[in-house]
Image (spheres, grey):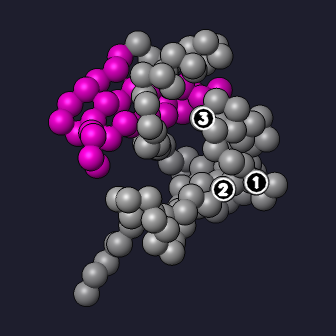
Amino acid sequence: MRRVTGIGGIFFQAKDPAALRAWYQAHLGIDVQAWGGTAFSWADAEGNPTGGTTIWSIAGEDGDAFGPGRPSFMINYRVENVQALVEALRAEGCDVLDKVEASEYGTFAWVIDPEGHKVELWEPPAGS
């Protein structure tokens, strides 16, 4: 029996969900919809749709869907050109960490969102 087959969604809470959604839309280009999130469509290696989605959504802190406790997390976002994005984010006044790492797994950089969440930006290696 297969168990986990992928990521169905990324859900997190914020002190000011509207402001945080606006930051992600303005600086990372996430197409945030009126319901508070977006659906990323799945594609194969050639970019052809494969019929699935991953949900991304920010909720307010007032609900109990994440309880008990306050989970911590870091989300890794796949990007096309991490160096160009890092330069753009710095120019926009975002809190970008100085470290950029390149390895056989790709190139990684990090930005801190307005509520203090560390966000990982990942440019996969060529051909991935």
Q: What residue span does the magenta drawing correspond to? A: 99-128
- First in sequence: mark 3 or mark 2? 3
Q: What residue would you read off at disc 1? A: 33
Instruction: Quote the CA–CA distance across marks 3 and 2.
Output: 13 Å
Amino acid carrying label 2: it is: Thr
Point out residue 3 in the picture as x, y percentages from the top left corner.
Answer: 31, 78
Is any part of residue 95 visible from this angle? no
List the residue tagged with mark 3: 28
Q: Is residue 119 magenta?
A: yes
Most foreground residue, 65 or 82: 82
Does residue 102 appear in the picture of this structure?
A: yes
Q: Is residue 10 above or below residue 97?
A: below
Determine which residue is flagged by label 2: 38
Horizontal side of 116 relative to 49 (left or right) equals right
Secondary structure at numbered mark 3: helix
Disc 3 residue type (three-letter): Leu
Q: Amino acid at mark 1?
A: Gln
